[in-house]
Image: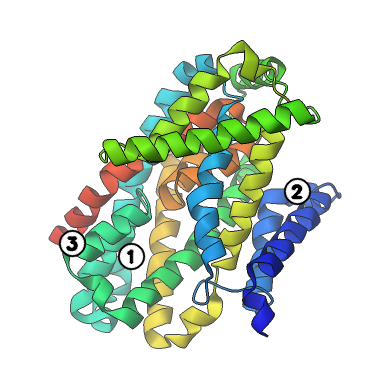
Amino acid sequence: MAFTNNPIYVLTVICFTVILAVYGGKTVWGKKVGAALLVILIAAILANLKIIPSASNGIPLYSGIFKYVAPIAIFYLLLNVNIRSIKQAGLPMIGLFLLGSMATTLGILLAWTLLSPGGVFGADGEIIAGMLTGTYTGGSVNFNAVALEFGFQEKGALYAGVIAVDNVVTTLWIMVTLAMPVLLNAIWPGKKNDHNKAVTAASSTAHPGDESIDLESLMWLLFLGLGSFFLAELFKMMVPQVPSILTLSTMGILLAQTQFVSKLKGSHNLGLYLVFIFLAVIGAHCELSAVVALKDLGLTLLAFTALAVLLHGVVITLLGGLLYRDWQMIAIVSQANIGGGTTAIALAETFKRQELVLPAILVGTLGNALGTYLGFLVIYIL
C-alpha cells in the first residue's frame, strides 16, 4: 500500500500508538509494564505487520524524529532538572557506567569465545565485534567510526544486516531494562533510597512541569526549544568538536535555573510526549523479518549480539547490586550503554527519577567518548 509511506499517515499512526500506550498504561495490567514499554511494543507489532514502515523501508520522517524530536525532548525534560541533585546521583552513575562499559567489552569477548561466530562471519568477524562493542558503549557514532576505518559500510547487505540485528537487540533490551527493577526487587530487594525520593519530590515542586499547559507557556516552550536547538546546531558548525546535544543540554539546564522558565507549565509533559514519539520509532526499527532474511548469518548475528548484551546485563547487575543495589539506576545505566542517552532518559522518566535525567545525559556522552576506543581494543584482542 503506497500510502503507508506517507509521512502524515505514519505520524498519525505513531500519535495514535502513543494514545493507546498512555491509556493502556493506566489499566491494572498496564501499570506493571508502563506506557514507555507499551509504545515500543505496539509500534514494533505495527512495523512487523507492515502497517507502518520498518527500518529497511525507513522514511525521512523517522530520520527527522531522531535528528530533531529526540534532542528537543531532552531539552524540555531538562527544564525540570534540579541541579543540586547532580552531586548525589552523578558520581554513582558514572562509576556504574564505566562498569557497564567494561561489562559490554567482556560480554562481546565471552560471546565470541562461547559461540565462535568467526566461522560464519569470516574475515569480517572481528570488525563486527568491534562495531558492536562501540555501539553498546556509546552509540551509532562509534558503530560507524569503526565501520568507516575498515570500509565495512561498503559491504552493503552485511552492513545492513548488522544494523538490523542491532536494532532488534536494542529494542529488546529497552524492554528488559524497563522490567528489570520490578523483577530484581522481587529476587534481591534494593536499598531504600529516601534521598532520591526527596530530590525528586523537590524537583517536581520547584518546576510545575506536570501542570496543564496554557497558551503563554506553550508559545514560550516552543520558541525556547526550537531556538535553543538552532543555536546548538550553529555552535556545532563553529566548534565541530562539541556535540550539539551537549550545547543544547547545557542551555536547558541553565534556563531551568531561571525564575521565568521555572514558572512555565507543561515542559515535562511536552518532553515526555516527544520521548514517546521517539520510542515509537525505536519500536518500528525492531524488524524481525530483516534478520530472518539473512538466514544463517542473521541468526548467528542475533545469537552473538543477544548473548553479548545478556552477559553485559549479568555483569552490571551483579557488580551494581553489590555496590549500590539501586535497580532503577542500574537499569538506566545499562540502557545508557546499550541504547544511548535518549533511551536512558526515557527510563529515568518512566521510573519518575528526575534526579537521574541529567546524569543519564552525562554518561551517554561519556559513552560516545569511550566507545570507539573500546571497539578498536576488541578488534586488536580478537
Residue in front for this viewpoint, 295 or 188: 295
Q: Quadrant of residue 75?
A: top right
The residue indicated by pointer 2 is 32
Residue located 31% across and 41% down the image: 237
Residue located 64% across and 46% down the image: 274
Q: Quadrant of residue 49?
A: bottom right
Tag 3 or tag 1, which sits nearer the N-term?
Answer: 1
Q: Nearer the viewer, mark 1 or mark 2?
A: 2
Residue 36 locus on image (x, y percent): 67, 50
Do the residues bearing badges 3 and 2 touch, measured as CB atoms within 8 Å? no
**Total numbered labels placed on residues in the image:** 3
- Give the amino acid type for the residue marked by disc 3 in the picture: Ile
Q: Quadrant of residue 6?
A: bottom right
On screen, residue 345 versus residue 50, left or right, reads left
Tag 2 or tag 1, which sits nearer the N-term?
Answer: 2
The residue indicated by pointer 1 is 111
Image vertical order of residue 167 relative to residue 352, above or below: below
Q: CA distance from mark 1 to mark 2?
A: 32 Å
Residue 51 locus on image (x, y percent): 69, 76
- Give the amino acid type for the residue marked by disc 2 in the picture: Lys
Image vertical order of residue 166 relative to residue 159, above or below: above
